Structure formats: C-alpha cells, structure tokens
Image: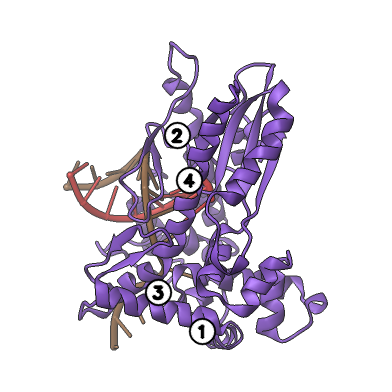
Chain colours: A purple, B red, C brown
DNA sequence: TCTCTCACG
DNA sequence: ACGTACGTGAGAGAC
C-alpha cells in the first residue's frame, strides 16, 4: 500500500488516508467530507472506488483484519475472569431509548458473524465443559411480525399466518407477479424495502442502499404503499400520535419521549418522525424478549434445571445446556419465547433453535 | 474527550 | 434547498 501510494503513512488514520487518496492520488474529484472537514473514508465510500483502485481494495482488507484483531482477538482473552475462567459481560437496562438491553465490558452483543474471518471468532465461544452444548434460540423476523400485528395490514398479516417467506411475498406484491415468479433480484430489493419500513424509509435511503436510482426507489415505495396500505396508515398514525403526545410507545406502553417531534428544523424533525415509527417496533420486540427471559428463568428454577441462560442479543437467547436437558430446552425455550407476548391480529411469533459445540454452530 | 470507523441486531 | 433508514459499544487517532 505504501508503494502504491508513493508515501508511507499511518494506514489506521482516516485523516491521513483521506489526504493520500483524495489529494495525492486524486481518486475522486467529488470526494465527500465529514462535518469537520475531513475526507470521508467509510466503507461505503471506499467500496465505490475499490473496483478500479487496488490500494482501496487493500485498505478495505486491512480494515477488516485490524478491526477483528484489535477489538476481539487481542482483547477478549485479556478479559477472562481469573476466578471463573470465563468472559463476563454487563447488561445495561436503562441506556437504549427503545428498551433494548445494551452490553459492555466487554460488549458481547456485537461478536462477528458476517465475514469468514469473523465467523472464526464466534467459534471461540464454547460451552463450559464436554458435558454441555450451546443452545441458541432466536426470533424469526420478529420486527416485521410486530409491524404486521400492530398495523393489522391485511397482506402482511396473511403472509405470516400462512408461514410464507415474507420477502418473497412482499416482492410478489410490489412487482406485481406471482410468488413463484419472484426472482432473486426482486426478493433482494423487497428485503431492503422491508428493512426500510422498520426504519422509516425515504426514497433516498432505499436508493443508496440498493445502488438504484431515486426514481426507481420511489416507484418501488409507491407500489409498496399501495399494496400494503395498512403499513402506510401505521406510519401516519404513529407520527400523528407522537406529535400530539410528545412520545411514542410500545404495545406494552413503554414510552420514548421525542422532544424534537414538532421541531421547525426539517432534518431534526424528520429524525424524530423516524424514531416515532421505529421505537414502537424495536421496543415491542425488546419487551417481548424480556418477558420471555423472565418466564424462562422462572421455568429453569421451577424444574430445578442445571442449564443456564447466559447471553441475550436482541432477538436471540443463548444457553449453556447440560446434555441431559437438551431435548427439554429445545422444546420449551422456543414455546415460551413465542407465547411471552401474544401479538394482536393473530400474528404468530416464531422462534427457532440450534445446538452446537460453539456459538457459530449453534446459530 | 471528540471524531471516525465498524462490529452486531 | 436540505439531508436522509433504527438502536448500540469500542478501538485508534487527533487534539
């Protein structure tokens, strides 16, 4: 990389990297800057340049490796408790405004899984001894199920009741084809639209996420809103509620106060409006898994089981399970997760399990 | 201590 | 015209 740049510099410094890429090498005459005037060198920026510039591709590889080494490989072993021989996290119950837990010292809610090298790190998380397995139980599409249930949208509720692949069903409606005619490309776009719904999408955000034009993105969204009219109503109602009361709330009544919901500044107000849409969804999912955790812990104690609930990662629970108790927990844990908070409009919650000798296998 | 970047759901 | 998808925690650099 130094040879390609024609200069030695600190590869880990975004400031120095920006100056090398955009001033010395002039890779992009329209390079964007951050609020503070530095060149932006985030992954999305670099990916656009990587195909034509080997140094950028190499930087991305360097970033992946140094992130994994510095944050996980070199750090987690230092945090092993000498008394227990294990790593212990702390959970905060009063940090995330939506009602989620957060995890720190160390954060065990962001252990890698997306890349091949990341998966190697996840494999390092193992049960306490050879008489135990790790059991993972995770909610399937929980946030979309909650939107369906809270909005009562006809098509989305139907898709979940019938056990359909939600992204395929969405694609069929948005692109006006039979479900059997949905292509991989159509499903990929529909999946992105479904995520957008949860976050309070804009045509701009969808376009940049999918690498398509704003006009194509707008057409997709317009089609979506026509087919899933209940979702449009959900969004309008939740923004109006927040404007009137000054907060958004979950199905169970957890409030997120939104002081900027009536701001005269467009950007600030739009941010609060997206939170008015997202908070009840993310927060209801958080309420649900917390109720499940309470129920499950009570059951473990009532039945005098030895297995332990050891981690929560937003829509997933991890257990250190004694081999004799595997069959029991594999049946009971997802049942209790599914029943912890019954959703309106007969939308079922679904939880799936996996067993393994490490966290990657169990997932 | 702030900024930027990037790991996760 | 403007800036733009929700929620976190943490490491490195820069000051």
Read off the residue under disc 4: A291
Both on one chain, marks 4 and 1? yes
Badge 2: chain ID: A
Q: Nearer the viewer, mark 3 or mark 2?
A: 2
Residue shown at the point (55%, 61%) measured from the top left: A343
Compared across the picture, whether A176 is left or right of A121 comes to right
Q: Position of residue A78 (x, y in %)?
A: 43, 21
Compared across the picture, whether A103 is left or right of A226 comes to left
Q: Earlier in the sequence, mark 2 or mark 1?
A: 2
Q: Secondary structure at mark 4?
A: helix
Residue shown at the point (66%, 75%) measured from the top left: A170
Both on one chain, marks 2 and 1? yes
Q: Which label number is shown at residue A70?
A: 2
Q: Quadrant of residue A124?
A: top right
Badge 3: chain ID: A
Q: Quadrant of residue A182?
A: bottom right
Compared across the picture, whether A194 is left or right of A88 comes to right
Q: Position of residue A162 (x, y in %)?
A: 74, 68
Q: Earlier in the sequence, mark 4 or mark 3?
A: 3
Q: Toward the viewer: A283 or A37? A: A283
Q: CA distance from mark 4 to mark 3?
A: 50 Å
Compared across the picture, whether C13 is left or right of A121 comes to left
Q: CA distance from mark 4 to mark 1?
A: 41 Å
Q: Secondary structure at mark 1?
A: helix
Q: Earlier in the sequence, mark 4 or mark 2?
A: 2
Read off the residue under disc 1: A214
- Contact check, label 4 and label 2, Cβ < 8 Å: no
Read off the residue under disc 3: A30
Residue shown at the point (30%, 73%) measured from the top left: A242
């Amino acid at each position: 990389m130094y040879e390609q740049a024609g200069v030695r510099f600190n590869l880990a410094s975004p400031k120095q990297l920006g100056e090398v890429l955009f001033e010395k090498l002039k890779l992009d005459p329209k390079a964007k800057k951050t609020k503070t005037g530095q060149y932006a060198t985030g992954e999305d920026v670099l990916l656009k340049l990587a195909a034509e510039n080997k140094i950028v591709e190499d930087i991305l590889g360097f970033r992946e490796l140094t992130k994994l080494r510095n944050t996980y490989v070199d750090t987690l072993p230092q945090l092993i408790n000498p008394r227990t021989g294990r790593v212990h996290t702390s959970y905060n119950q009063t940090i995330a405004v939506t009602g989620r837990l957060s995890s720190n010292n160390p954060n065990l809610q962001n252990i890698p899984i997306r890349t091949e090298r990341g998966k190697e790190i996840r494999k390092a998380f193992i049960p306490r001894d050879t008489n135990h397995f790790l059991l993972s139980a995770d909610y399937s599409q929980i946030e979309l199920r909650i939107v369906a249930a809270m909005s009562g949208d006809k098509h989305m509720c139907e898709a979940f009741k019938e056990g359909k692949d939600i992204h395929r069903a969405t694609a069929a409606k948005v692109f006006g084809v039979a479900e059997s005619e949905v292509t991989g490309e159509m499903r990929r776009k529909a999946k992105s639209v479904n995520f957008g719904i949860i976050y309070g999408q804009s045509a701009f955000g969808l376009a940049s996420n999918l690498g398509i034009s704003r006009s194509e993105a707008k057409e997709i969204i317009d089609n979506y809103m026509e087919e899933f009219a209940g979702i449009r109503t959900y969004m309008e109602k939740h923004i109006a509620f927040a404007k009137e009361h000054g907060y958004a709330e979950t199905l169970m009544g957890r409030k997120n106060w939104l002081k900027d919901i009536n701001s005269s500044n467009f950007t600030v107000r739009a941010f609060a409006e997206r939170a008015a849409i997202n908070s009840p969804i993310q927060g209801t999912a958080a309420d649900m898994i917390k109720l499940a955790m309470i129920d499950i812990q009570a059951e473990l104690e009532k039945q005098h089981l030895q297995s332990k609930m050891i981690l929560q990662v937003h829509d997933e629970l991890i257990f250190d399970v004694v081999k004799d108790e595997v069959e029991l927990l594999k049946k009971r844990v997802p049942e209790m997760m599914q029943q912890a908070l019954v959703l309106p409009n007969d939308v079922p919650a679904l939880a799936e399990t996996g067993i393994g000798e490490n966290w990657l296998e169990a997932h």
